[in-house]
Every structure is written in structure tokens, then in C-alpha cells.
């Protein structure tokens, strides 16, 4: 299966006019069922769109253990929620998307007691701790629905780990990125080193920023392909991101979520393996009413409605 | 083995002057043995160069099942043809490289009868159908010789699947690309999702265009590395593409086809695996007269002639 | 584990001011223990930084077998040397980083006697020869510490193979690159075809330069992400490269070398595999005093000193 | 999903009584549509069972190129034939399952002309030839339906390659096996070395028989797990094999062919990869009426009938 | 690192006398913290040994959804419990280890409502359901500590999926095994097809039992290597299994759990990958006091005590 | 390519008579060029056969660091030696093949000084040490020629690591095996856990012996496929092993070494990957005179002579 010829564009429209951002409701509704989180605000800017905001502004949205456990819990829930078809992630306040790990909390936490312990036993505790932390952050990578991240202000350390789990990254002109971990004496272990080399093209650049922990800004991030749009302000970036998420949410969820599943598979498999996986996947998906009604809408010019998924 | 110092450039030539396109014979000769295809025109613009043109202009070069079966048949033949060392692919007419799948034909074809069938049995039919379709298009990916695609006008859906199977992509300023499949309610399954993420650098961009099905043009395609040259017109793009294909066809086919084989292998294997594969490959290839005569020509300044391969 | 919020920048400093190159000692000290190489000069421009210079200027720094054996020997030694935390590689003289393989030496060497030999036996000799050659050059890829390559003048054939083994590539405006091997009748077999597609984003460009052996310059190299900085002169590029290497050498070697190990692993493994490997790695690394003293230095604002590694 | 408790066995039956071979029709019907092969006889011993007999008894069922092309053609057809749910493969006559490659034909065939050719060009011809040969034999490995091979008499060289492509191997007491290739100066290249190590448990034994080309018989083959049943005569082995194939053909083809697909995938993928592939596969397959009617038949004790697949 | 020469055996003991089962406390203590499960009894037959008993004897220990959720919950807890170093799994009652899936519950459960649903949406529900089911059963495969399964009576369908997740399998002479899934119209999807081919040597046998769903008994299971011990009764098998688990629990948990981790990794990675992973693992593990005290005990002949892990 | 029909057996010979061991020269000649090793004796029992004997009988052939460095050095030399086509490995004296690691030497060696060191730095030292140790032992796995190990007396710990690197394993009735490492508080890290699961069929057995460190003898080793022959005495086992090695050494080295290379590749790659690798390999190998003369000898009945490789 592949795609059809697009219908002729409306007269007066140039052939390349990209779809503008969908109109965004100004008052974001709280999302039913997601009211009780402490460190995140989840709202519904449009039908089938969830907006997750990291909300710990007094700490520059830094992550302590309760924060990342909640993060994992939210994304595991979004994964199964038929009312959600796309997600926007941003950080509260103007200062920071997130300043990364809450170092003070970390040094007082479970790792504090490892000194003097048997090395292998301390290693076991650390592996368990890192694994759980990774799982929480990776829950965004495996949520199964498109995620658009809006990155602004300080976005360092864990901020990069998280950004790498999004599908699409937008940022503001004032963003300050850094793969900061070597400056606290460690190799990044929540996914930046696993994912960053696979989402941008220049490995010379990747290695430089990972070894130096130096800052880089919006322009550099756009040039290497880390972000695909730079906006003048956070509010403008949010409008763009929600517009994109809304556009995606209006498409067939069978098509969009299948596309995501196959792209995730492609990242870690050979072309041949992925082609076979895709054929097996579409063996079921093409029997969907979404396929039939979308095909039909190409002829009738009526916008199809899709059942929940 | 690795390469030698290039001979000093002729005086008056700057160090970076890239080789210009080779002169192209204006009247393209029909290629002996490829005269009988219905939907494709195969000509020979230069020695050892085949030019394959999708030729169904009344349908915007859309692909129905007979078209893709013929496509597979041509490329399987080119793979074995010692008179072919490089291939140019383009679409007939000004409107479209290809508008992708011929949706009308598809809805009347073998898939039409699946409604009401047992789901597993319909899935088997679909898997078989998709697999055969994939094999036909992949035959260009596995043709074993460099393919240069000239993309112009409408190039959506299956057009992207096909373009991703080329080695080098050139386009015109008027091209309109779209990974269109989600708009017909399905995940692209003929290779765009398997290959596109591996041929450009920015995954943020890849995911955006795959989830939205939005149009993108020449400039954007060049910026992300999808195409490596943008020309003002289709005829200019053809001149450039045939020039490139001719330049390649003048090189040792042992060297060029070995290079392609190793690059294909590198895409899906580790560095270490690929180095071993390469050593095994060159264990035979370096015994070729092409290697000897090319080395010699470096000293004699005479252009070597290479036997057919 | 992930990173912390950066301390507030000193007043007067903009949020994006990247760290400038560290001051470089003008008289490069010979590096103790590396004095006796014939084709390379190894000096110590700064503490924990080694500068390796290919030094065969009368031959455009071309590589014959003794040269690459020495290259392998140096990098295997650097890998184990606790006095080295980062490496700069450059070529002596103004004409060339390296013109690649010393073709004359090659044609007179062990390969000369293969004519007329049994094909399988000649293939065995060739595989052995290629494998040993690959191992020598790959020793830079596996040195375990960041390597910054300064590429200038002629940098073709084996020059590309070598450049692809560096972490970070800087070049001068006068550089002339070419994946030259097809012009001597062979597929590149010392790593360009294995590594180049994995370090830049545009495969359309990769295939074009590999099939044509055409020259490309600094601007093109920067655009596709092959190099991450272009300098006006070789001396300026060296200052930049040594500055970068010095900056890296001042960081925790536990953090930097762990980062390199994990990035190397990520290149050839799935995200999931790499996350597990990382957790196992950091199970030991986070017990290091480097982690504790770096965390502490975030509070005390004193620069930590790190033990040799 | 997993399985149910089996219904209580009929009284008087021990808990371990394996199902006996199904009754076999004595006169094997020619299979409609498979009448025109020259080197094979295809019959239908029972509903949905195909029996393929290598039929070149005057040559000990040796394979020349026309034989293996026909072999590939038959199995590619069986793969798509809804009237076939399981296959039995055997050799005509008493002397040999197959004596392997028809060496005389091989030495007179396309390989004859390679002497004196350019090594790389001859290698290309050979790779093409081997690849096509492999594809024909592998068509039995990828037929998608269970294949039971009956091995008797001489079964050497290519006979082992072929036997390794079956799912289940039965043999007679008089069988004489050998991985014979080293005795004709070559490494086996049609699949014995790829598959044999993966279908038996003792690698010490595998390597011994592959390096020595020595004969081994039924008892040894059963001990290492190469065959799972030894019969006193070819006719008895055929009765057993057809009985097994018939038993399988009476099961749900959705279940059986899904099982084969997943087992093939498991051979070459990690446990985790396979579990995901299986979940995707069964997402469609469990919607089949076969699942429903089989579940129901567990309660009604009536044997379900399954639609063609 | 590798092992030392064993101390000379006590006089009077033959060189091959395997260690007998450790004495087992007859009254099994309930295991603190595991009292509240509905379908499982968890006791502590010896220090650091947990005995998990499937306890739904009125249903032949069949698994409905609440049962497998509890199973997953128990094994995820055992994974983190420092008081547990090895696990024995068995089934309550004489009739069955487990009859597998509780088919009646399954047909009334969440799958009941899928009829008539959109195929792609039903597939999504099924994939989610299968994935969660797989995760629960796989939690025994990933528990990180040795598991010994005692298999008796009926052990079919899901019973095989579960048994394949154990490290060591013992059975009784009266056991009745079957990979039963094809008889309910489906391919096994909880792991039998992923794991069974990797834990026994004869693929001919694996495919036969998977395609036929036929019964097989203790003798056959031992012959192909599925079980490594056959006992005359369930009580004797339990004594043997608990003896083995106790022997293991007395060893260094750092050594045993490292061994399990590396064996799990080896199953799905190349030899070379596994060797590197092992070196990284032991980089921490060999710094443990367990290594030192075990080495020392070889000289002092005193049995070392190991800290909790 | 595959094999030919074997010539009819000489009259009076049964169809299954395996080739007996070749006659062995009683006085083993020292092998020219291998005289100067301290811990090994290398002799030449027959043309093209090397016999390597671990020769440290006063220490039960235990391995300290100088021993394994010498082991690696010998096998790297054998790999390149055209006078060697197969290798037999055994241990001197009656007591032990090897008792494994020389624990006393190990505790006094480089690991002694790690106490109190920074954990990450000690881990780096350990990883380096383990990696070098692995490389030395793996040099037998990668020697490229068949190795037959004769295992007798004590064969524990490192003895198993080494045995797993052989192609074929023979043992005596008095052998005492144990994967001993957990008893010295560590996971085996020189390859037993990487290779043992891949060379025998029963994973239940593998895990039991790896977790318990218990002894097992010849009968058990043969039953699970670890060894493929049990002899009554060491001298008889040596006669058998040298006979096997001699038989192999008389075959075409192109065929035998190709077979080994492909089997090694098959262990760690998919069937499909291996088939392609094999086709590339044989593209050169089939042009060998070994292939031609072996084919011819099938007709002339004269034993071919093969050039050195």
C-alpha cells in the first residue's frame, strides 16, 4: 500500500503552502482524570490533545525522584488513554524547561548511603536505581503517540534526556541547551547518549557537545537538526506545538499510531526486518474502517470522523 | 587498501573545481532489450547508463499493480545487465514524478473482496500483497548499481517510498513532496518509514512530516539532506543526473558496485561486522584487472578501459 | 542519574557564551615516552593532551605499511596511558593532512607477488593484509579517549578513513577532501564506507561522493556535518583543536571516557541495549570520587582535581 | 493467550499415548496443478497434504541446475496454495534421497567458462550463481507451512542442505549422511553451515562432521537431534511422515502457519523482539473464526472445520 | 578471571560424586511479606530460598487474568527482595502443575466484546492484552535469580510458556506436557515459541511438538534436554529442587546473580558482545568482598558468609 | 554449490564404516619455530598438524598471567602459519588438563593493589585486565583452523573457558569438569557463559552446572553434547584426536578454513546474513585450484595434493 495523488489544491493557494497551525482554545481545560498530579499540570487544549506541563517552577522544574516517578506514571497512562492522540510537553514559567536533576535531593536520597558499602552491592543498588529512572523517562519514548516538546530557557542535563524522547522538538530563541553530565563527573545515563546520536546527523557535533558539556543555543540546535522549529517566544512556540498536535490528532489514530510504531521499530532494526514487521502490522490495520473512510473521503471531499483507539 | 595521492591538478585549475556534468547526447537511444514495457521508457543517454522513465502521464504517473510489477521486472533485469553501470530514474511529463498509488485501481483490485472475510485470512492476503509490492519497489534498492532519481512536480506517497530507494536524489524547485499515507488512513508500508529516517539527519523533521502528511518543497528537502541538488527545471535536473550517472559509469564497475554493496551492508550492520565483510569482499575484488589498470593509469595518465561486469 | 541545574552565570556573561579555547602553550613539549617514532611526532601542548602529527612531509604524509603499523602502535599506547585524556591529530606541513595510501610502496609491497597465485590463496593473503591495516587505523576509533582531527590541504582516500575514526573533525578553508578509492579501481576498505554514512546525515551526499571520488571542500563538509568547524588557517585550526582537547582534558576522565564508551556502544546497538549497558557501566562509575567531588564543586565553586585514570 | 486444559482423556487411554499416524490413502492422487514438473512428482496423499518426491532415480536424484530451479518453483507455488497445509518431501527409489549436486553437470555448466576470467568478474558470476541456488533451496525454508522430510539411502552434500530446510526430519535405518563438501574442495554454501548448527545441540559434533565430511548414520543422527524418528524402511517412514503431515493439516491453518512464522522469526531474533512480533501477529490472528470455533469445539467436543487459507 | 583448582575431595569420595540435595526443613515457613496472595502460596523452605506454589487446585491451577497479574506481581517483588537468592516453582495438588489458560474465564473476559469491532481497534486491544500477559510471565525470566521449576501431572499450554522461563526444569514420571495452543486455533504467544527453540537442542522435535500439540512425557522431555532430572514423585522432585535451590542460595549472590545476568545476555547477543558486557560487569563485581572472602576460604577451608544483596 | 555423490564404497565395507583414525607417528617431532615457549610444548605428530600441550605439570597446568599471554601468542602464530592446518590441544601429565586459574598467583598479581582505590579506576584496571585475558583465550576461538581438545583429569574453571573455544572436544572417562567460578565468588568471565550455552543443547543443564559449580563427568558431558567422544585413557584420546586432526589436515585447507570461517559467522548471525556472507566468501574460494583438483579427483580416484595456505 502507498499513498494516493493529493486532490488539487484550492485555487489561489500555492503548491507549497504548509498547513498553518490549527486554532488553539485559549483557556486550556484540565484533562479529566489527570487532576491529581503534584509536579505536572495536564490540560486539554484541543480534542484528543493532552498538554503536559512540568510544574515545579520554584525549582526551575528540576527532577527529584518523586517527580520522575510521576512523569512515568503520567505517560504510562497517556499511552492507554483513548481520549489522547497526541501530546505536547513543556515546562512551567519563563526561566527553564527544566534545569535537569535536582542535585540537592539526589545527594540526600538513596545514593547517600552507599559510601563504604560493598562495591558490588552498591553497584546493584545503582543499577536498579538507574534502570527505574530510565524506565520512567523512556515511558515518553514508548507512549505510542506523537509527542511535541517545547523547549525554552534552561534545558540541560536531564532536560536533554527528556527532549530526546519526544518525536518533534520546537524551541525558543532564548533556549540554553547543554549535555551537562560530564560536569558533574558522570556519563549521561538516562538516554541522551543512546538517543541523541540517532536523532541528529552530525556525529562530530554530538561528540563535541557531549564531551565538553558546553552550552548551545537555538540556532545551533536547528542547524544540526535537533529542533525543527525556532520561535521567538515560549507562547508562540506553544501555539505552534499545539497546532501541530491538533493537526495530528485530527488524523486517523490507526494511521498515526501505526506510523509511530513502525518508526520506533525502524530505529533499531534493519530495513528488511522493518519491512516485514510493517507488512504484518498493516495486515490488520488495513482492515480498519479508518482506511476505508479515508479513501472514500478523498472522493467525497468530506472530512472523515475516526472512532476512538 | 586505501587511496593514493591525487595527481597534481592541471595548472589553472583551482583545487576545488568539481568535475562538471559529462556531455549528454541529446537524442536518447532506446535501450536494446527494454523496448517492450508498457508503463516505462528505458533509454541509453550514454554508454553504460540506463534512463528509466515512469511513463503514465495521463495518470500523473500513478502506480497500479501492473505498473509496480513492471517496475520490479525492469530493475531485476538492470541488476543483471552487464551493459548497465548506473541508472537515472525520472517521471514523464511536467506535472508529476508520480502521484503515488493509483487509489481508484487499488480500491477496485484484489483488496476489494476482503470485506466480511475472516480477519486472519484477510490479513494473510494483505501481508502477501504488501510483501509483493515491497519486493517490487525494493528491487531498485537492491539493484547493485548506483541510481540517481530526478524528482519534480508532485512526488507524494509511493513517490517517497521510491525516492528513498535511490542512491542520490536531485529535485527541481517546483517539487511538492509529502509522506501522504496517514491522510488515507494508513501507515506507509512500502519503505518510507524504514528508509527515510536512515537517509536524513533530523529525526524531529522526519517524524513531523510522517505524522502530518504535510507538503514540503525543494528548499526544505535540501536542508535536511533528502536531496543533494536542486535544479531550476526538470530538463536541467536531467542533465545533471545523467551527467553524474555518466561520470560513475566511466569508473571501474568492480569498484563502484563493490562500493554500493558495502554501503548497503553498512546501513544494517555494525562497523565491525562491515569491516570484516569488506575485507572478505576485497579479497576477491583486489585481484581484478580494474585495480591493476587503475593503479597504472595513475602513473601513465591514460584513462583505463574496464571490461563488462 | 542525570545532570544538575547549572550555577547562575557570572554577571555580565550572556547565557550562550561558549567557553573559549583554553590558552595553548606555544612551545609544544615532546611527550615523554613517545620520542622514538619515525613517521609521527607526539607532543604535549597541555597537561593530559597528546598531539600526534603525521610526519612524512616529503611524501605528503602518505601511508606505507611501516607508517600504518606505527600509527596503530601509537594509538594502542595512548589508549593505556594515564597521562593522556584527549588527543589532537594533524599532518605536518602545509600541503596535506595526508595524500592517503603511498601507492608506489603498495605496488612494490607484499601485494606485488600475488599475480598468478591461486585465487583463494591470494584472497587469504589479501584478507589478512586488509584486516591488519584496518586494525591499525581502527585503533584510533577504539582509543577510548576523545580525538580531535585537524584536516587541511589534501585529505583523500585513507585520509578520509582516518578522519572518520576521530570524534570531532575541524578543517581549514583550503582543505580538499575526496573518497578517492574508486579512482584506483577499488572499494574503500579501511573504514570510510563503514563509518562515513554513520557520521553525517545526508545519505544522498554520501553515496554521491563515494561513487564519484570527486573533490569536496570545507563548506560542503561543514554543511553535511562531516566537520563541525572551519578555520582560516591550519595554525588557527590547531589552536582551536588543542583548546577543545584541553577543555576536555580538564574534565573528569571517568566521566569523559565513560561518555565515549557509551557513545561507541550506541553506534552499533539498539536504544534498549544501550540503556542497559549504560546502567551496568554507571553502576561502577558513579561510585567514583570524581562524581562526588564534581557534585561538591557545584556547591563550593572550586574546580575539582581528578586522579589519573 | 495460552492454552487450555485438555479434555480428560478417554477412559482406557494412558496419559501419554501419542496420537498414532493418521490412516493414509494407499493410492496417492496426483496433485491438481502440479502435473507438469520434470524432476519431481507431486501427489496428494490426504486432504491438504502435498507429497513432493525428487524424481530423478537414474541419477540418484542428483541436482543439476534445472532440477533446483524446478525445486524452487514448486515450493514457491506451494507457499501460496490454499489447498496445501503441510508437505512431505522424499526421494524416489531405494538408493538415495539424493546424492547431492550433479557434479558432472556442474563442471560442464556456467562455471566451466570462468577459467582465465578476471577474478572479480568471475566472483560476480559465482556470487550470482550461488545466490540463485540458495534462493531455490531456501524456498522450502520459507514456504510458510510445515515440511516433513523422509531421508533414506544416500543423503549427502546438497541432501543435507535440503534436509536442514525441513521442519521435521525422519530417516530410515539405512540412511548414509555426510556434509560432503570439503571433499570436493569447498565450503558448503547452500545452507548446511548456516542452519545445521542451529538445529542440533552439540556443536562439537557439528564441527566434526563438517570438517571431516565423514559418513554418519541414523542412530547418530537421532542422538544429536538431527532427526526425530528412525524407521525400519522407507515405506514405513513415509507412512509416519504422511501421518504426521495429515495430523497437522487437520489443525487450524491460521494456528499452524502462525506458529511456523513465529518459530522462523525466533531463530534469528532475540526473545524480546520475538515476543513483540508475536503480539503484533496475534493481534490479527486471534480475530479469526478458527480461534473461536476451536475454543468452542473444546466444549462441544465436535471437530471444527477450517476455511482455506 | 577464571577458577581455581578445586580442593582435593574428601577421602572415600569418588571423583564424580555430585553434591546431594541439601537437607530440607519439613515444615515450610510462610515467607514474611508474601502472605496475602490469593492464587499462590509462598514459603521459605530454607534460608534465602523462596518456594512459590501455584495454588488454585480446584481449577487444575489454571490461569485467569487475576492469576497471571498476581504471578507478575510476586516475581517483580522477588526480584528486589534481598532475602531471596533462589526460587522453586511448583503447582498445588497431584493432578496438574497447571492446565494452562482458564479458557472459560478467557472467553468471558475482555476479549468477549471484540466481535464486530473495527479490526484495527480490536487488534490494538489484543496487542495490549497479550503484551501485559507476556510481561507478567516474563517477570520470572527476568527475576535475576535462579528459578527451579518442578513440573508434574498436566503441564500444557501456558504451563510450557511458564516452564520455559525457569532456569532449571525437573519433572516427575507422570508429567504430561503439550504445546497445546494450535488445538485452540492459535499460535502460542506467551513465550513458548520464543524460548523453547533456544533451550533444547533438536529443532526437529521442537517443530513437531509445536505443530501437532501432541502430548510428550518425562522420558522424551529429558532426552531432548527440556528437563534435566526426572523424579518418581512430586515430593521427591520437590526435595531435589529445594535441595538445588538451597545449594545455590549458599553461594555468593554476587557471583550467582552475575552469572544469571550474563547468561541471559548471552542468549540474545553475539559471543563478542557478551564478552565485552561481561568485562564491564565484572569491573564492579570483582571489587566485592564476596570475591575476596571466597578466594580466602579456598585457603582457610572455612565456608564464607555473604552479605545480603 | 553443494556436494557430489560419494563414490561407491569398496566392496566388503559397510555403508556406515566411519574413517578410522589415521596412523600416528609415535615420536612427536618438535614443531619448527615453536621451540621457545616456557609453558607449552608444541609438536608435529603429522604433516600440517600441530599438537599444543599445556605444560606446567607441577601446578596442575594452572594458568597465571605469563601462561595465558604465551597461550595467546602461540595461537596467534598458529593462525598465520601455512604449515598448520589443524591443532590438537591437551594438558601434560595425568592429573589435570588444567586446574584453571592459578589463584595464588592471581591474588599476588596486579589485582592485589586495587584495595582502597577509587572504584571507577579499579574498574578500569579490571576491565583492561579481563579484556586482555579474554583476548588471549579467544585467540584459540579465532585461530581459523580446526582445534580438537583432549580433556582429561581435572578440567575446571578456566579449563571450561578454554575447552569452549575448541571446535571438537574429546574426553577421558576420568575427567572431572566444573564451571567452578561461583565458588570463588565471581561470574565466569573468560567465555564459558558466552559460549557454553551455544555449544550444547540443554539450557536447563547449562544453568544448573553454572549456578552450582558442581562436578560433572564424561558420561554427562557426552549426553548433553559437550564432548563428542569419550575414551578410556588419555593416550587413547590423543590417538583419536590426532587421527581426527590428521584426517582434517589432509583435506583442502581452502575448504576446511572456509568451513570454519562460515561456521563462526553463523554462530552470531542470522541465517540470511550467513547465506550472503557465504556467497561472497565462495565467490573467491571456488576459483581455487583446490576445488578443481578435488572435483577431478572424484573422477580419477587419485588423492589431490593441496598447496600451502
Image (cartoon, coloured by chain):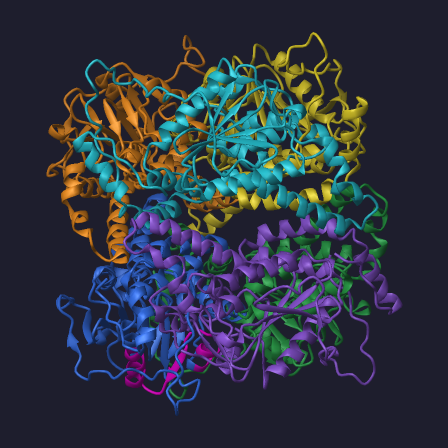
Chain colours: A yellow, B cyan, C orange, D purple, E green, F blue
Residue F222 forms part of the magenta stretch: yes
Residue C212 part of the magenta-drawn span = no
Asked if residue B106 is positioned above or below residue D1 in the image, the reply reads: above
Residue D121: x and y in percent read 34, 48
> Residue A307, image x and y in percent?
81, 33
Q: Quadrant of residue B146?
A: top left
Number of labelled discs? 0
Residue located 76% across and 53% down the image: D286
The residue positioned farthest toward the right in the image shown:
D300
**Residue at x-position 40% and y-position 82%:** F8
In depth, the one of C196 and E300 nearer the eye is C196
Question: Residue A269 or B25: which is nearer the viewer?
Answer: B25
Prevailing secondary structure of the magenta residues: helix
Residue drawn at point x = 48 percent, y = 40 percent: B78
Q: Nearer the viewer, residue E302 or B46?
A: B46
Q: Could you say where residue A94 lies in the image, as x and y percent from the top left? A: 59, 14
Q: Look at the picture and state if B165 lies above or below E29.
A: above
User: On the rendered image, what quadrant is the C terminus of chain C found in?
Assistant: top left
Residue lying furthest bottom: F12
Q: In this picture, which residue range is highlighted in magenta?
A: F219-243
Name the quadrant containing residue F268: bottom left
Q: Picture coordinates of residue E17 (x, y %)? A: 45, 83
Q: Is residue B114 above or below residue E218?
A: above
- Residue A223 visible in the displayed image: no
Look at the image and tell me whether residue B304 can be seen.
Answer: yes
Q: Is residue A220 above or below residue B302?
A: above
Amino acid at each position: 500500500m502507498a499513498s494516493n495523488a493529493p486532490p488539487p489544491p484550492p485555487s489561489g493557494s500555492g503548491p507549497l503552502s504548509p498547513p498553518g497551525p490549527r486554532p488553539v482554545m485559549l483557556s486550556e481545560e484540565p484533562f479529566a482524570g489527570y487532576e491529581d498530579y503534584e509536579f505536572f499540570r495536564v490540560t486539554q487544549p484541543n480534542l484528543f490533545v493532552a498538554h503536559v506541563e512540568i510544574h515545579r517552577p520554584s525549582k526551575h522544574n528540576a527532577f527529584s525522584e518523586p517527580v520522575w516517578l510521576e512523569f512515568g506514571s503520567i505517560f504510562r497512562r497517556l499511552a492507554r488513554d483513548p481520549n489522547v492522540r497526541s501530546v505536547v510537553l513543556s515546562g512551567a514559567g519563563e526561566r527553564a524547561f527544566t534545569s535537569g536533576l535536582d542535585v540537592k535531593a539526589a545527594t540526600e536520597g538513596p545514593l547517600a548511603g552507599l559510601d563504604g558499602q560493598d562495591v558490588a552491592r552498591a553497584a546493584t543498588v545503582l543499577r536498579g536505581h538507574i534502570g527505574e529512572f530510565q524506565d520512567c523517562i523512556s515511558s515518553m519514548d514508548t507512549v505510542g503517540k506523537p509527542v511535541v516538546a517545547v523547549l525554552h530557557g534552561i534545558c540541560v542535563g536531564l532536560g536533554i534526556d527528556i527532549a530526546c524522547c519526544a518525536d518533534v522538538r520546537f524551541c525558543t530563541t532564548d533556549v540554553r541547551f547543554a549535555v551537562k553530565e560530564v560536569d558533574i563527573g558522570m556519563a549521561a545515563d538516562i538516554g541522551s547518549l543512546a538517543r541523541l546520536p540517532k536523532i541528529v546527523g552530525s556525529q562530530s557535533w554530538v561528540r563535541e557537545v557531549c564531551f565538553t558539556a558546553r552550552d548551545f543555543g537555538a540556532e545551533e540546535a536547528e542547524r544540526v537538526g535537533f529542533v525543527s522549529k525556532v520561535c521567538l517566544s515560549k507562547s508562540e512556540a506553544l501555539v505552534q506545538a499545539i497546532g501541530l498536535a491538533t493537526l495530528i490528532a485530527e488524523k486517523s489514530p490507526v494511521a498515526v499510531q501505526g506510523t509511530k510504531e513502525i518508526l520506533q521499530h525502524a530505529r533499531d532494526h534493519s530495513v528488511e526486518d522493518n519491512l516485514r514487521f510493517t507488512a504484518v502490522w498493516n495486515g490488520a490495520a488495513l482492515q480498519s474502517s479508518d482506511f476505508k473512510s479515508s479513501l472514500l473521503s478523498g472522493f467525497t471531499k468530506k472530512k472523515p470522523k475516526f472512532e476512538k483507539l
